[in-house]
Structure formats: C-alpha cells, structure tokens
Image (cartoon, grey):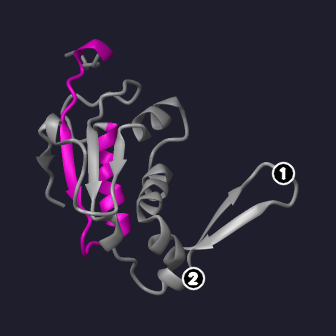
Amino acid sequence: MNTYMAKPAEVTRKWYVLDAAGKPLGRVAAQAAVLLRGKHKPTFTPHVDCGDNVIVINCGKAVFTGAKMEKKIYYRHTGYIGHLKSIKAGHLMQQRPERAMELAVKGMLPDNTLGRISLGRLHAYAGSEHLHAAQKPEEWKI
C-alpha cells in the first residue's frame, strides 16, 4: 500500500467564508488556519501547499474571552534600536480588527515558506461586505 502525496499541479483551491460575529477570535482563527493549510482535505500533504482561500468577515464583531481585551498586548519592532511598539487588544480591535485576526491566524501557521504563502490567501474584513463575490465562496460553519 502506497501513501498518497499530492503534487502542486493537482491541487484545486476553493473559497470559503467564515463569519466571526459573536465568536471568540481564536476559535475563528484556528478554523481559518486549518482551511489555509488544507488539513480538512483527505489529500493533505505536509510539504505541499494544498490549502484553500479564506474570507473572514465581521472581524470587528469577534470577541475576546476573559480580560484579554484589557490585558493582551501586541508587540512589534520597527527595526531601530529601542523602537518596540505595543498596542492593547481592545485598542487594536477599535482601530484595525482585521489586523488582529491576521495576527491570530499567523501565529497558528508554520513559520516557514508554506506558512507565508498560506497567509497570503487570507482575506479579513472588519464588516460584513467583501470584494470576492465573483469567486463564489461557500459558507463554512464553525
């Protein structure tokens, strides 16, 4: 019995829509990471990019559990000495909720070339409107 290994030319990509309204941000991000990697497919191969495109809508209506809204801090570095920037989760959700979703999904993908390519197929929107109606995305239930 042979193990099936997918080839990059054989991969077919679909489009899925995830609605984050009223759901914990981490739960939605975890499901998006699974779809981006392709782990929901029976033909999943770890070294081949076989994931799908994911649209996450209503990122602004996603919720944090516990006291994460006040206590969780996102850090980034500008590249200059001493220029470590920080922003609280509540403030980031007010300013750019789609960025909070992107950071959550990025943390759940591998830190290699496949992870970076997979993150490029994530499309996050703060509201309920998205620009990908022509791709005929399917709704994915969480």
Numbered disc 1: secondary structure: loop
* Amino acid at the residue labelled 2: Lys
> In this orientation, which residue lies closer to the viewer: 55 or 107?
55
Q: Nearer the viewer, residue 69 or 132?
A: 132
Q: Which residue is mark 1?
A: 80
Mark 1 neighbour class, 10 Å CA radius: few under 14, some 14 to 19, many 20 or more: few
Q: Which residues are magenta?
A: 8-37
Q: Which residue corresponds to the image point at 78% horizontal and 48% vertical from the top-left?
A: 79
| Amino acid type shown at disc 1 | Tyr
Tell me the quarter of the image containing the C terminus.
bottom left
Q: Is residue 64 left or right of residue 43?
A: right
Mark identifier at residue 71: 2
Of the numbered discs 2 and 1, the one sitting upstream in the chain is: 2
Residue 29, compared with residue 13, is above or below; it is below
Query: From the viewer's perspective, is 115 left or right of 125?
Result: right
Point 88% across, 54% down: residue: 81
Quadrant in the rendering for residue 52: top left
Q: Residues within 10 Å of mark 2 (few under 14, many from 20)?
A: few
In space, the residues marked 2 and 1 are separated at their CA atoms by 26 Å
Q: At 84% from the left edge and 51% from the top edge, which residue is drawn? A: 80
> In this rendering, which labeled residue sits more in front, label 2 or label 1?
1
Residue 16's tag is none
From the top left corner, tell me how far across and down residue 21 is, in percent: 24, 70
Q: Residue at x 48, y 81 (%)?
A: 69
